[in-house]
Amino acid sequence: MKYRKLGTTESEISEIGYGAWGIGGNQWQGAVDDESLKALKRSFEVGVNLVDTALAYGEGHSEQLVGRAVRQDFRRIYVATKVPPKNRIWPASPMTPISEVFPYDYIIQSTELSLRNLGLEQIYLQQFHVWSDAWTNTDEWRKAIEDLRRSGKVRYFGISISEHDPDSALEAIKTGTVSAVQVIYNIFDQMPERNLFPLCQAMKIGVLARVPLDEGGLTGTITEDTQFAPGEFRESYFRGDRKKQVVEHVEALKRDLAGVPGSLPEIALRFCLSHPAVTSVIPGMRRVATVESSCRAASAGKLDTRVLETLKRHAWNRNFYQ
Ligand SMILES: NC(=O)c1ccc[n+]([C@@H]2O[C@H](COP(=O)([O-])OP(=O)(O)OC[C@H]3O[C@@H](n4cnc5c(N)ncnc54)[C@H](OP(=O)(O)O)[C@@H]3O)[C@@H](O)[C@H]2O)c1
């Protein structure tokens, strides 16, 4: 495993982080706690030292599993979690006042609940689970950050940027208040390269690349016949003729990648790590096999320029979250 410095912090973060949404069990089906704990443990053994979870993932269940795994391990593991929007609306609307989403008392209480779920004394990176720059010039969120850092309950703050809106936190980043952002970045969604990544590089802000496998689209395993459990998030994400569209895009990708060593998911993870703004890529990994495959990808290093040029052509501008 290789490590990269997170922005201006003192921390060296593993290039692969553990995305812990899927193990929460409410929106992704099929996670089994024993298997999730084994996957978490294996990830630490192979050098992963960052886990990204959220209070909203299984209403604390993901945090509880992460806390158990982290407390049983002797290594230094950096835990990132998130304050959900108080109104529980994803993504944020600029028309909604911040008082309905992140009031001061709510940020403090949500952080304390996450600490109890995790069984830890400090959250390494606390992130706002939605953001709108319409809120940047208000005071309460900054005061909450100051107070939580002063009390030692949180080491650093970050923003989890809304899907398909990578420019929605540029003003907040410019304040210098946050140390990291996380954003959707993958072969299909290359939008953050335009404005967000150059700003993060200039401001020395850490970047966690999330959804690197397009919720499974870039694993190459989705076919027109793939069925998701009723009510699972991906049933909606890949609804209608979307699976057919994904298959067509993946086939085109595979044709262009013929001769490039590694599986499609491994190349997809290396794509993210090839951008110098990215600190860590955080695939969801509920199984030991996917942990091992993802970590192998990171050890293969950056993709060469010729492959990156090819992948640029596969950017695909669509929003399946709607
Ligand atoms: N708003 C937000 O803040 C937000 C939203 C979405 C995601 N996130 C974060 O980003 C993380 C990643 O996103 P995601 O989990 O939604 O989707 P993702 O990482 O794009 O895709 C996860 C899928 O890829 C599979 N996979 C992972 N590594 C693989 C490999 N090497 N080879 C083959 N398949 C592989 C996983 O399999 P198995 O699970 O079966 O092992 C899972 O089915 C989340 O877990 C969460 O931490 C944050």
Image (cartoon, grey):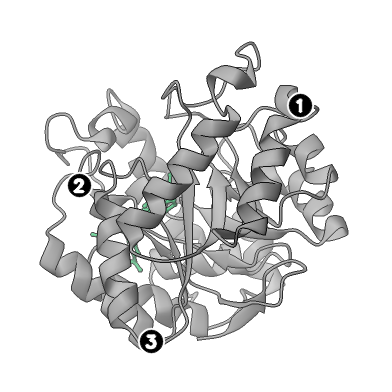
Spot occupied by residue 95 in the image (x, y as percentages of width and height): 64, 11
- The 10 Å Cα crowd at callout 1, few under 14, some 14 to 19, many 20 or more, is few
74 or 170: nearer the viewer: 74
Q: Type of residue at label 2?
A: Gly
Q: Would you identify the image quadrant in which residue 20 lies?
A: bottom left
Q: Give me the C-alpha separation between circle 1 and circle 2.
A: 35 Å
Would residue 57 be seen by someone viewing this image from the given angle? yes
Q: Would you identify the image quadrant in which residue 271 lies?
A: bottom right
Spot occupied by residue 250 in the image (x, y as percentages of width and height): 40, 49
Q: Would you identify the image quadrant in which residue 237 lies?
A: top left
19 or 291: nearer the viewer: 19
Which residue is tagged 1?
138
Q: Is residue 84 left or right of residue 189?
A: left
In the rendered structure, which disc, 2 or 3, sits on the residue that comes first in sequence? 2
Q: Type of residue at label 1?
A: Thr
Q: Look at 47% across and 68% down and name the residue there.
A: 17
Q: Give me the C-alpha separation between circle 2 and circle 3.
A: 24 Å
Spot occupied by residue 52 in the image (x, y as percentages of width and height): 44, 58
115 over 2 or under it: above or below: above
Image quadrant of ligand 1? bottom left
Q: Look at 21% across and 40% down and name the residue there.
A: 26
Spot occupied by residue 293 in the image (x, y as percentages of width and height): 34, 76
Q: Secondary structure at mark 3?
A: loop
Q: Secondary structure at mark 1?
A: loop
- The 10 Å Cα crowd at callout 3, few under 14, some 14 to 19, many 20 or more, is few
In the rendered structure, which disc, 1 or 2, sits on the residue that comes first in sequence? 2
Q: Secondary structure at mark 2?
A: loop
Which residue is tagged 3?
46
Q: Look at 73% across and 22% down and name the residue there.
A: 134
